[in-house]
Amino acid sequence: MYLSIPQLTSALSLRDLSDPAQGEHAMQTLLTDVVNALTGTWTIPATVHRTTPLVATADNYDRLGYAPDDVTRDARYSRHASPTVMLRSHTSAGIPAVLDSLASVQDAYDQLHVLPGLVYRRDAVDRTHVGAPHQVDLWRIKARGLLTDGDLHNLAGAVVEAVLPGARWRAVPANHSYTSHGMQIDVETPAGWLELAECGLVGARILRGSGLDARRWSGLALGMGLDRALMLRKGIDDIRLLRSPDPRIASQMLDLEPWRPVSLMPAVRRDLSILCGPDADEETLGDVAREALGGDAEVLESLVIRTRTPVEQLPSAAYLRLQAQQGQENLLVRLTLQALDRTLTDAEANALRDHVYVALHEGPVLELTG
């Protein structure tokens, strides 16, 4: 399950839209607005940390309090480079190093630490999910002064106002391995209530793990998906638009003005009947499909499992035709293909369909279009 050198190189070469050093993007403006709102509210300085996405597995999980059997550790959903190193699955993986750096501080301290960047997951393919989304962790760390639930609500309110001025929001109780009094922050949109961020008071054991006395130190922690935040702010319903090279689209990704729809190319659908193991799901299949398509992955708008049937329940003729193995499942998968800048020909759509089919199908009989 370890990443190959080409896979690792591809992941590390992906442009980070939140980083000004990699080109201008509206995501940076939104992040700046959020940071300025918080430093202005609290009158404290901020430090931005941009570190390599390759992190110690212990920093990504153990030092943030994740249990050894937590589902998030499952190798199917994370990207490991070795037994002890992985591509971070959340920007919180940079927090242990930040806290370690404060162990020698003896004076009063109050600062906002900002950790933005790409995170890497095996995720479903649809209009709101990608395998490498952007996140930001916003942690206020303070010595000699207790931060409370009231400060946590002020943090949530300031972030919501910076992202969606005037929006209604609500706090829903949530559990996190590295916080107490955790909350999920939902905002009201025309489509209903949507999650924007999660936050909580920094857990005492996380502080103690970096040598910080929890009687002297306290903190607030908030994590937010920057892709979703920007999509909500601009009124965008397709996450692929954030990276589109189409000049009509890319020019609109330089500011926070509302999205002005452009005429998109028609979508093409292809259905696949494949054999897979019983643990296959849209997240793992989506990741394999992206890998198979390589540079054409942006053409894949969505991958949806429409039906799944244990092979033992298939008609005998179908079972024999597929040469299925006991324990496998027959999945009907629908691909939606849509290039943002051109119309796909039937031949192109079929070729893409076949690439994905070969990558997903775990059987000896191939049913290709050409």
Image: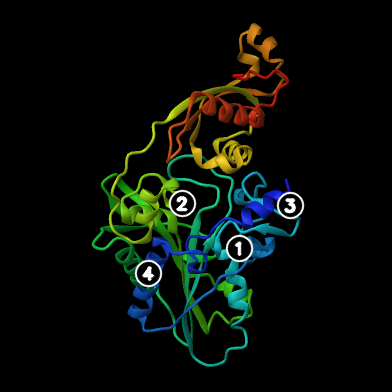
The local crowd at label 3, few if under 14, some if 14 to 19, many if 20 or more residues have their Cα within 10 Å, is few
Label number found at residue 5: 3
Residues under numbered marks 1 and 4 in contact, where contact means CB atoms less than 8 Å apart: no
Judge depth for marks 4 and 2 and give the one in front: 2
Q: CA distance from mark 3 to mark 1?
A: 30 Å
Choose between 200 and 352: the one closer to the eye. 352
Q: Earlier in the sequence, mark 4 or mark 2?
A: 4
Label 4 residue SS: helix
Q: CA distance from mark 3 to mark 4?
A: 36 Å
What residue is shown with label 1? 65
What residue is shown with label 2? 243
Residues under numbered marks 3 and 1 in contact, where contact means CB atoms less than 8 Å apart: no
Task: Find residue 18 and report its horizontal and vertical position in percent.
Answer: 47, 63
Residue 69 in sight: no
Q: How many discs mark residues in the rendered view?
A: 4
Q: Earlier in the sequence, mark 2 or mark 1?
A: 1
Image quarter in which the N terminus is found: top right
Q: CA distance from mark 2 to mark 1?
A: 34 Å
Q: The residue under label 1 is which amino acid type?
A: Gly
Residues under numbered marks 2 and 1 in contact, where contact means CB atoms less than 8 Å apart: no
State the image quarter where residue 296 is shown. top right
Judge depth for marks 2 and 1 and give the one in front: 2
Q: CA distance from mark 1 to mark 4?
A: 27 Å
Q: Earlier in the sequence, mark 3 or mark 1?
A: 3
Q: Is 220 left, or right, of 171 in this rendering?
A: right
Residues under numbered marks 2 and 3 in contact, where contact means CB atoms less than 8 Å apart: no
Label number found at residue 34: 4
Q: The residue under label 4 is which amino acid type?
A: Val
Q: The residue under label 2 is which amino acid type?
A: Arg
